[in-house]
Image (cartoon, rainbow, N blue to C red):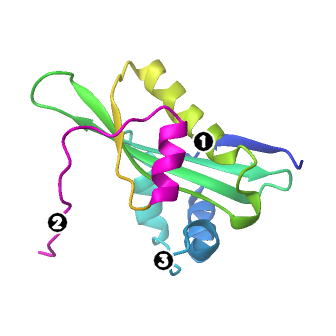
C-alpha cells in the first residue's frame, strides 16, 4: 500500500485547494468546481472556523480531503462542528484515507474541547461510512432547503 499523510491546510496551501476543485469528479463524482481566487482561498484557509485537511500521497498529491465548520451556538454547548464534506480519490478508496481524515477531525475536536459533530449523508454509501465511523442517525430528520439572495 502506498503511504499517505494527513495534514491540516493553512494559508499558503491555496494551490492544494485549487487542485482538488479541478479534480472534483475523481474525489466526489461531482462536476469540477471553479477554484477560489487566491485572495478568497487565503481567507478560507485563514478562517479559524474552517477546518480543512488533505491526505497526500508520497509525492505530495492530494488523495483525499475533509472540511468542517465550527459553529457557535446561542445555548447549550458553546460550539459544535458541521462536518461539511469528505472526498477520496476513486483509486484510493477502501485504503483508510477517509477514516484517517475523520480521525484528524475528531482529534482536532478533542484538542479544541468541542464535543458534538454532525454530518448530512446524501446516499447509502455515505451513510454506511459515517455509521462505521461511529455516527448515528438522529431522531430529528430535517429537510435541507436553500435560496439564493
Residues 64 and 132: in front is 132
Residue at the extreme right of the image, as rendered: 1
- Comparing marks 1 and 3, which lies closer to the viewer? 1
Reading the image, the residue beneath label 3 is: 33
- Kindly identify which numbered label has been placed on residue 120: none
Q: Which element carries disc 1, helix, strand or loop?
A: helix
- Kindly identify which numbered label has been placed on residue 101: 1
Residue 92 coordinates in the image, percent (x, y): 75, 57
Separation of marks 1 and 2 at Cα, in angstroms: 28 Å
Which comes sooner in the sequence, label 1 or label 2?
A: 1
Above or below, comparing residue 35 to residue 65 in the picture: below
Residue drawn 70% across the image and 56% down it: 93
Residue drawn 48% across the image and 19% down it: 111
Separation of marks 1 and 3 at Cα, in angstroms: 21 Å
Above or below, comparing residue 91 to residue 132 in the picture: below
Separation of marks 3 and 2 at Cα, in angstroms: 21 Å
Residue 38 coordinates in the image, percent (x, y): 49, 67
Which comes sooner in the sequence, label 3 or label 2?
A: 3
Q: Which element carries disc 3, helix, strand or loop?
A: loop
- Residue 29 sits in quarter: bottom right
Indicate yes or no whether the magenta region holds residue 95: no
Residue stretch in magenta:
124-149
- The C terminus lies in which quarter of the figure? bottom left
Indicate yes or no whether the magenta region holds residue 144: yes
Crowding at dot 3, Cα within 10 Å, few <14 / some 14-19 / many 20+, comes out as few
Q: Which element carries disc 2, helix, strand or loop?
A: loop
* Residue 44 as seen in the image, left or right of residue 148: right
**Magenta stretch secondary structure, dominant:** loop
Residue drawn 41% across the image and 45% down it: 68
Reading the image, the residue beneath label 2 is: 145
Residue drawn 58% across the image and 53% down it: 65
Amino acid at each position: 500500500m502506498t503511504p499517505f499523510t494527513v495534514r491540516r491546510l493553512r494559508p499558503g496551501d491555496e494551490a492544494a485547494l485549487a487542485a482538488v476543485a479541478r479534480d472534483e469528479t475523481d474525489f466526489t463524482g461531482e462536476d469540477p468546481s471553479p477554484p477560489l481566487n487566491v485572495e478568497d482561498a487565503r481567507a478560507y484557509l485563514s478562517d479559524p472556523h474552517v477546518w480543512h485537511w488533505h491526505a497526500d500521497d508520497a509525492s505530495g498529491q492530494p488523495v483525499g480531503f475533509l472540511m468542517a465548520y465550527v459553529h457557535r451556538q446561542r445555548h447549550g454547548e458553546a460550539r459544535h462542528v458541521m462536518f461539511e464534506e469528505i472526498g477520496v480519490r476513486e483509486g484510493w478508496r477502501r485504503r483508510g484515507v477517509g477514516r484517517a481524515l475523520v480521525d484528524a477531525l475528531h482529534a482536532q475536536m478533542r484538542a479544541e474541547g468541542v464535543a458534538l459533530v454532525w454530518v448530512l449523508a446524501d446516499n447509502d454509501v455515505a451513510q454506511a461510512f459515517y455509521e462505521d465511523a461511529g455516527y448515528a442517525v438522529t431522531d430529528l430528520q430535517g429537510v435541507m432547503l436553500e435560496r439564493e439572495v
